[in-house]
Image: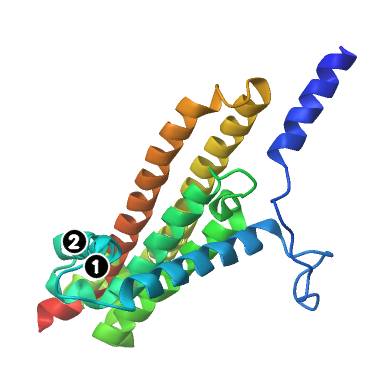
Amino acid sequence: MAARGRRDGNAVEAIEHSAIFMIPNFLALWLPGAFIPDHVAMAWVVIALLTLLSVLCTRRLQSVPGPLQNVLEVTVEAFYGLIDSIIGHHGRRYLPLLGAVGLFILTANLLGLVPGFKSPTANINTTAALALTVFVAYHYFGVREQGALTYAKHFLGPVGALPKALLIVMGPVMIPVFILVEVIGHCARVLSLSIRLFGNIFGEDAVILFLFFLAPLIAPLPMMGLAIFTSVVQTLVFVMLSTIYIAGAVEHGHEEH
């Protein structure tokens, strides 16, 4: 029993392993602890990798693209295809947000498969920050496209479309109810985006580490292949839902034009 307990303890320690490097906490006024939290440090690694890759891809753009420029163009076209299919051609203005979020999530998901590194998206703080970014952004886009008053009517649900006579009678009762329902629905989007991404990435990382503890270099390999697939799928789901939320926020403004 004691041996089994020690083994289980080692497995737990494996899941909670530290990253290959730790950054001294130079933000002590805002972050507790002697070192920068692993998920923050790994997020910085992802940002640095994407920045370096973007510089390498764009420093010498040519009419006959090289390998890196080809990768960049294929990636941009893939995002354009998704945006065009959900929002329309005018939705391409939201590529900076959707592209940055998508590339960050994909790189962060895959980073955990590299020995000594951890996936920033395996921490609920990272996924919640991403979800809140999308939440604030699509409301901002909606207000910018339609105006604050027109956009606020979204929260009235079907009550806003009632005739004035019926609205006077039913409004005092129905309006607060529908506003509450809409607010809960929008808040649930943040929970859905953050928990789904966190749960999938944390779960796959934990399984890989357990398998590595049981049979190093052999057992984790099939799961790592599945993890790559899951990382891509979760990125697609997050970006697709974000695009749908933006479409719902701005579509009426464009229909009026």
In the rendered structure, find residue 109 and report the number of the disc placed on it.
Answer: none
User: Residue tagged by mark 1?
Assistant: 247
| Location of residue 247 by image quarter | bottom left
Q: Is residue 55 left or right of residue 219?
A: left
Q: Earlier in the sequence, mark 1 or mark 2?
A: 2
Assign a secondary structure to mark 2.
Answer: helix
Task: Tell which of 180 and 116 is nearer to you.
Answer: 116
Assign a secondary structure to mark 1.
Answer: helix
**Picture residue at 26% right of the left edge, 67% below the top:** 69
User: Residue tagged by mark 2?
Assistant: 86
Q: Position of residue 72 (x, y in %)?
A: 28, 65
Q: Position of residue 199 (x, y in %)?
A: 53, 43
Q: Is residue 107 left or right of residue 6?
A: left
Cα distance, mark 1 to mark 2?
Answer: 7 Å
Q: Amino acid at mark 2?
A: Ile
Q: Amino acid at mark 1?
A: Ala
| Location of residue 28 by image quarter | bottom right
Callout count:
2
